[in-house]
Amino acid sequence: MQTDNPCIIIVTSPQHTGKSSLIAQYINLCRQHNVSVAGILAEGLWKNDQRSGFDLVDLTSGIRVPLAVRCAPHGRARISFEFFSEGIDAAHAALDAKRCATADLIVVDEVGKLEVMGQGWAPLLPALLELPGKTHVWAVRESLVDAVAKRWSFTPRAVVEARSPDALDKLTAACALFDA
């Protein structure tokens, strides 16, 4: 039964512990079941067992562009990343409500501190949430789940812990986009 309200599932875990990997597995399952997917996935790049940056994947077109690279920390930041305008522009295009309107599933990886402060992808999210009957999967760090839900005034259908052994099953059940 489709409603006008969005169905929002939060995939959570601490920083760098598998949110994007779980979502990527779920996207592959969706595509195997002919579920259309739009939005963005930030795939981590690793060097010497350390995250060296991120590529942004436009889930509609499949185009991959550099989003960020690790740089020397500044201020009180333990880890700092420099963001590329090419990646930010690609994310804005991928998260355009008109591009996402025909998708069954909208992915936003990740909704973080910048978004809670009204920056980053935040200006794009209200239009996505206004699309009737869409299922959303948002990656959100554990420490930000309540702030994200409060900022956009929703109660998630489910919060799936990415490190859980049955996380993919829980995500599949929560989204209910196809018979598992």
Image (cartoon, rainbow, N blue to C red):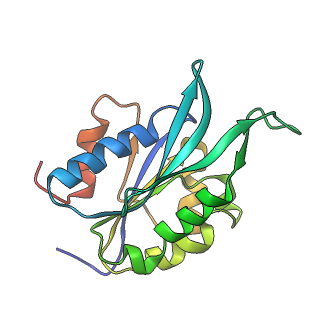
Q: Which residue is drawn at 30% across and 50% down?
A: 27
Image spot of residue 33 (x, y percent): 14, 55
Q: Which residue is drawn at 26% across and 47% down?
A: 28
Whether residue 106 sits left or right of residue 146 in the image: it is left
Image spot of residue 47 (x, y percent): 59, 24
Looking at the image, residue 55 lies above or below residue 149: above
Identity of the residue furthest to the left in this view: 179
Whether residue 161 sits left or right of residue 144 in the image: it is left
Towards the viewer: 166 or 127: 127
| Location of residue 4 by image quarter | bottom left
Q: Which residue is drawn at 54% across and 62% down?
A: 91
Identity of the residue furthest to the right in this view: 75
Image spot of residue 18 (x, y percent): 45, 34
Q: How many marks?
A: 0
Whether residue 151 sits left or right of residue 10 in the image: it is right
Q: Which part of the image, by quadrant, shows the N terminus?
A: bottom left
Towards the viewer: 150 or 54: 54
Identity of the residue furthest to the top in this view: 48
Image spot of residue 10 (x, y percent): 43, 52
Tell me if I can see residue 153 in this picture: no
| Location of residue 151 by image quarter | bottom right
Tell me if I can see residue 23 in this picture: yes
Q: Residue at x 61, y 67 (%)?
A: 122
